[in-house]
Image (cartoon, helix red, strand yellow):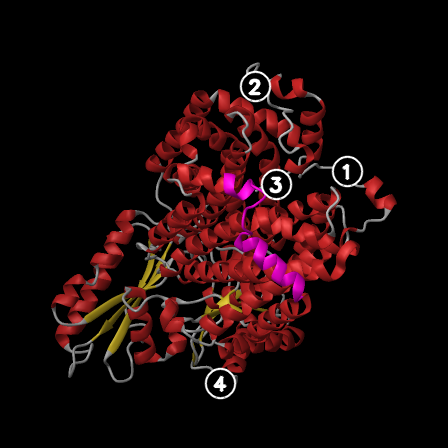
């Protein structure tokens, strides 16, 4: 692989204008597609194999035209102080809005008058209009949304407070200027790392090109592929971070080659052939982990993972082609005077040890203490993870400034929190001798469970199916509401045995509960899949058993610690105000699995770029301890910069108004912090120091069986050293391919 990438690096360096033109054309094409496509709002939500989904499917069969999965909205009214919504003037306003909503769009299926549907609070201060649509929220037209937004403006003029909740009026997530700050921090880190504005700006520009292509493509395909509004944001978050990091590794290696005195084209070829091999491997791990989300069998999560994986793939291709092309345009300006002097000083025998060298030597002196402090520290942070509760946030998790949150709070105050998440119980009486009696029995049983209200059964035309609306006492995302759903389902088993009628619970709240349960069930199998994959891939790269085992266990430790931090902030509320958490609650169901997939790939990044240099030094005669020092001497600075950039980019998304984006941004930033600085920079060298030569042991039969993927570029280095003509055969201009600058010493210096 390294030899092929070496040739690719030289080719793209020579043909830089053509390569740049291709990427610019792709960016323009993707941008045009995004500009001409309709804007995505929310993805349709289906969970194959769950009871809630089976109930939705049954509703579509038995209640044709009812649009069971259609969008819903609630227009909530609160009368001015001292007045009631039943007062003549206020009642007239509300009745007028009911008529306006019914005639506002042909996508409206039903509008319930609050005075006929008993949707008025006992004290008369609050009322709500329920609106159901024929299509899901993804398919609502702008005209329909505008009609919904305009509905309450006249009533607000009369003094009533009017807010709109439900999924019909989705608030598009926005991250404000926070992510710009993250990119700015990344720029500062790059300038400090490289000491050159040109070298610092190149990874940023190429990463933005890759993210622009990826996100624009997702936007262009959003309507066709039913992609949610958060899919592009998550793809941008991950694509931007890995795009900067991958370019950083290539540029850093290129500058190291220039400092050794090589010609620019040869340096580009070697940079892509060595550091580029590690980029391919690291990117492959991220792609596999994200694409592996498909095993959970939830379409929305599968699409989200594939979209993010596509953006990461583009970032890898950018690093392998556009980055060396850009290096050709940058010329010698890629190395400023200070950077060149620093490189010369570092390569001189009298050079003072850098920070990475000093830290590695400290770890070698105190390996047991460093390992214990790292493991115990992360263990303490991980303790809250034992209280992890997964679910999906409702409108109560929205910022207080949104109309959805205002509608949620107003309904809770006027009717009780359970009105924000009614349950829909479907009674299938096709196999019952008396469907009506069975439905009545279901309603009475549910009433005995201590819910807030039960609406009498409503039958279809055939009389073989009925729906019962149930109002829980607690808010939709509460544990008590989840228990109500389970209690109804348990009671339904007894009713089926007695009457033959099947009882199914659905609705948005039940769907969220089923979704959370499915994610919870998939968490451990997915974690086992990812950790197993990590072990196999690292065994292939490092040709060792204990090094991959240590890497996998370290990854597990950082993930559990990150989950503990997330639970402490978002579930327990610790430091919640610092991160803009206005409502604590269960952790987003998809967050742990999504975090595992992403952090797995990033952890392998740092593992590869640090430990490959250690293995190279050990293979070429250095003692195990000295090999650790050598690895940190050449890799610690760049890995530190890469981790800080990752943390800065992910932290930028904590300012998002969307709870899911905020939570994932926080979890990824914390996970990278733990994995890069505690696991990879402290625990890994401590464990390697304790293991000594045993760390690199591999049975001979396994060594022969494993293919050599040449991530370190050993075959390439041997070819360049033994055959000088090989390096110049691609260009006819460079004669320094085997010039002896370091020979086998120069395998992977990142």
Rounded to the nearest angstrom, the CA distance separating label 1 from label 4 is: 64 Å
Specify the label residue 251 is tagged with.
none
- Which sits earlier in the primary sequence, circle 4 or circle 3? 3
Q: Position of residue 272 (x, y in %)?
A: 57, 32
**223 vs 321, nearest the viewer:** 321
Observer able to see residue 49: no
Q: Which residue is mark 2?
A: 734
- Which sits earlier in the primary sequence, circle 1 or circle 4? 4
Task: Check residue 358 for magenta coloring.
Answer: yes
**64 vs 382, nearest the viewer:** 382
Rounded to the nearest angstrom, the CA distance separating label 3 from label 1 is: 16 Å
| The C terminus - image quarter | top right
Query: Can you tell which of label 1 and label 2 is closer to the viewer?
Result: 2
- Which sits earlier in the primary sequence, circle 3 or circle 1? 3
354 left or right of 651 in image: right
Q: Position of residue 652 (x, y in %)?
A: 39, 56
Q: Which residue is mark 3?
A: 278
Query: Can you tell which of label 3 and label 1 is closer to the viewer?
Result: 3
Rounded to the nearest angstrom, the CA distance separating label 4 from label 3 is: 59 Å
Q: Which residues are magenta?
A: 344-366
Mark 1 crowd level (few <14, some 14–19, many ≥20, 10 Å Cα): few
Q: Position of residue 279 (x, y in %)?
A: 58, 40
What residue do we see at 39% from left, 45% from top? Answer: 191
Q: Which residue is mark 1?
A: 707
Q: Position of residue 458 (x, y in %)?
A: 45, 69
- Which sits earlier in the primary sequence, circle 1 or circle 2? 1
């Amino acid at each position: 692989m390294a030899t092929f990438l070496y040739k690719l690096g030289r080719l793209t360096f020579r043909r830089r204008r053509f390569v740049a033109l291709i990427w610019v054309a792709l960016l323009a094409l993707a941008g045009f597609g995004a500009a001409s496509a309709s804007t995505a709002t929310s993805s349709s939500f289906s969970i194959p194999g769950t009871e809630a989904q089976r109930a939705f499917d049954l509703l579509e069969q038995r209640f044709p035209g009812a649009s069971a999965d259609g969008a819903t909205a609630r227009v909530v009214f609160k009368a001015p102080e001292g007045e009631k919504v039943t007062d003549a003037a206020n009642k007239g306003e509300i009745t007028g809005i009911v008529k306006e909503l019914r005639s506002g769009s042909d996508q409206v299926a039903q509008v319930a008058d609050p005075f006929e549907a008993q949707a008025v609070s006992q004290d008369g201060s609050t009322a709500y209009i329920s609106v159901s649509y024929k299509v899901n929220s993804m398919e609502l037209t702008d005209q329909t949304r505008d009609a919904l937004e305009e509905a309450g403006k006249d009533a607000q003029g009369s003094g009533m407070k009017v807010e709109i909740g439900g999924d019909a009026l989705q608030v598009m997530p926005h991250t404000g200027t926070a992510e710009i700050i993250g990119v700015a921090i990344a720029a500062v880190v790059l300038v400090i790392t490289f000491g050159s504005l040109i070298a610092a700006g190149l990874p940023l520009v190429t990463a933005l090109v890759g993210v622009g292509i990826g996100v624009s493509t997702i936007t262009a395909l959003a309507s066709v592929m039913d992609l949610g509004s958060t899919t592009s944001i998550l793809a941008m978050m991950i694509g931007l971070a890995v795009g900067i990091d991958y370019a950083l590794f290539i540029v850093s290696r290129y500058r190291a080659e220039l400092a050794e005195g090589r010609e620019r084209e040869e340096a580009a070829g070697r940079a892509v052939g060595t550091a580029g091999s590690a980029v391919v491997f690291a990117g492959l791990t991220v792609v596999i982990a994200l694409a592996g989300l498909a095993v959970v069998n939830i379409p929305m999560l599968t699409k989200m993972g594939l979209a993010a994986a596509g953006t990461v793939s583009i970032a890898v291709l950018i690093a392998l082609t556009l980055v060396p092309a850009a290096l050709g345009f940058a010329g010698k300006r890629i190395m400023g005077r200070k950077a060149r002097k620093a490189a010369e000083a570092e390569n001189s025998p009298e050079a003072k040890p850098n920070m990475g060298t000093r830290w590695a030597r400290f770890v070698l002196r105190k390996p047991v203490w460093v390992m214990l402090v790292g493991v115990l520290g992360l263990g303490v942070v991980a303790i809250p993870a034992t209280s992890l509760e997964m679910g999906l946030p409702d409108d109560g998790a929205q910022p207080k400034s949104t109309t959805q949150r205002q509608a949620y709070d107003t309904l809770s105050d006027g009717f009780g929190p359970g009105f924000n998440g009614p349950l829909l119980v479907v009674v299938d009486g096709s196999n019952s001798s008396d469907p009506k009696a069975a439905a009545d029995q279901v309603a009475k049983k549910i009433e005995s469970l201590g819910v807030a209200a039960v609406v009498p059964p409503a039958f279809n035309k055939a009389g073989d199916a009925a729906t019962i609306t149930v109002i829980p006492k607690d808010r939709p995302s509460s544990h008590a509401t989840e228990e109500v759903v389970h209690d109804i389902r348990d009671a339904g088993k007894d009713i089926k045995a007695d009457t033959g009628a099947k009882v199914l619970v659905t609705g948005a709240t039940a769907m969220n509960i089923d979704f959370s349960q499915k994610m919870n069930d998939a968490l451990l199998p997915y974690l086992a899949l990812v950790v197993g994959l990590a072990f196999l891939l690292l065994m292939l790269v490092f040709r060792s058993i204990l090094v991959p085992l240590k890497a996998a266990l370290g990854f597990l430790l950082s993930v559990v610690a990150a989950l503990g931090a997330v639970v402490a902030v978002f579930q327990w509320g610790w430091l919640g105000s610092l991160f803009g958490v206005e409502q604590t609650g269960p952790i987003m169901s998809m967050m742990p699995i999504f975090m595992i997939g992403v952090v797995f790939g990033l952890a392998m990044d740092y593992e590869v770029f640090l430990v490959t240099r250690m293995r190279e030094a050990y293979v070429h005669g250095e003692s195990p301890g000295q090999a650790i020092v050598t690895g940190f001497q050449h890799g610690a600075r760049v890995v530190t910069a890469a981790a800080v950039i990752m943390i800065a980019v992910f932290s930028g998304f904590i300012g998002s108004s969307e709870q899911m984006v905020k939570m994932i941004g926080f979890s990824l930033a914390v996970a990278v912090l733990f994995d890069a600085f505690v696991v990879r920079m402290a625990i890994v060298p401590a464990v390697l120091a304790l293991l000594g030569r045993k760390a690199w042991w591999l049975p001979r039969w396994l060594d022969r069986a494993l293919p050599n993927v040449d991530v370190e570029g050993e075959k390439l280095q041997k070819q360049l050293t033994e055959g000088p003509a090989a390096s110049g055969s691609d260009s006819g201009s460079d004669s320094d391919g085997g010039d002896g600058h370091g020979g086998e010493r120069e395998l992977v210096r990142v």
